[in-house]
Amino acid sequence: MIRRKSGYIFSETNGTNSMKWGVTCFFENRRDFAKVLEIAPQFPLSYFEIRGEQPFFAPEVLSEKELDFFRNIIDRSGLKVTLHSTFYDINLATINSFLRKATLECYRRYLDLAGELGAEIMVLHGGLLHRDAVDIPELLKTARRNLVDNLRSLADYAAGKGVKIGLENSPPNRNHLMIPGWQQQVEILKATNRPNVGAVFDVAHAYLHRLD
């Protein structure tokens, strides 16, 4: 599973020469999601990605009725759907044991949503280590270990939902990123060693890091 993203447009390849295109959806007013039905027929789209952030789409703000609204639009669009889980106020590599429990619970809620939507993939980021801690080898080691262990835990949970996890490279940050580029991405994926965890490579993020 390899996805390439650039801004709000992404493509996907599955070991073949064929490429499938999709678009990311994020609206301040979730009712505007219906615009997908107008936009999709104008382009050769196979997928769309729902950005899982407030106020648009997040488990803590969605009622069952609102979730039915999303399901209806998805069914009518004829497109496959992926879910980009929250990127704000969360850290999959946290070294804080209290925050780690909350992080896993949050992502499980997003995986529940992904399963209910019929999403093939849930995208997440690898997190970071605070810049003040990066020169302490033991803390960097702990952050990496927690990231791998957390990915394994979420992968096992996701398997029960029929959902794959896409680990995406992160945009620049003043703190130490666990996944700034493809090299770290490959390293963490190998260490995680779960068949339903793959790579989402954002070329726009790579460009911002000045990576070729």
Image (cartoon, grey):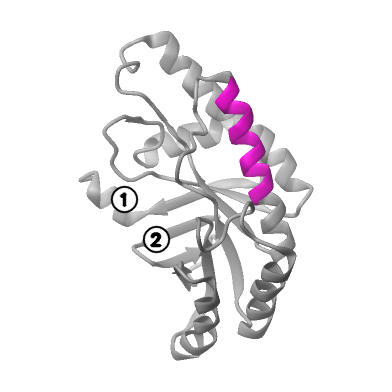
Q: What amino acid is labelled 1 in the image?
A: His
| Part of the protein shown in magenta | 98-110
Mark positioned earlier in the residue sequence (1 or 2):
2
**187 lies left or right of 153:** left
Label 2 crowd (10 A; few <14 / some 14-19 / many >=20): many
Instruction: Residue at 35%, 41% (x, y): give it.
Output: 181
Q: Position of residue 128 (x, y in %)?
A: 41, 30
Would you identify the image quadrant in which residue 65 lies? bottom right
Q: Does 99 lie within the magenta span?
A: yes
- Residue 170 drawn at (x, y percent): 38, 44
Q: Where is 43 relative to 88, above or below?
A: below
Q: Nearer the viewer, residue 87 or 188?
A: 87
Q: Position of residue 186 (x, y in %)?
A: 46, 38
In-image side of 43 versus 175 (left or right): right
The residue singled out by tag 1 in the image is 205
- Tell me the residue that label 2 is attached to: 5
Query: Residue 151: in sight, yes or no?
Result: no
Q: Is residue 105 magenta?
A: yes
Task: Specify the quadrant that holds the N terminus.
Answer: bottom right
Name the residue: 53% across, 60% down.
Answer: 15
| Dots 1, 2 in contact, CB < 8 A | yes
Q: For numbered disc 1, what is the local secondary structure?
A: helix
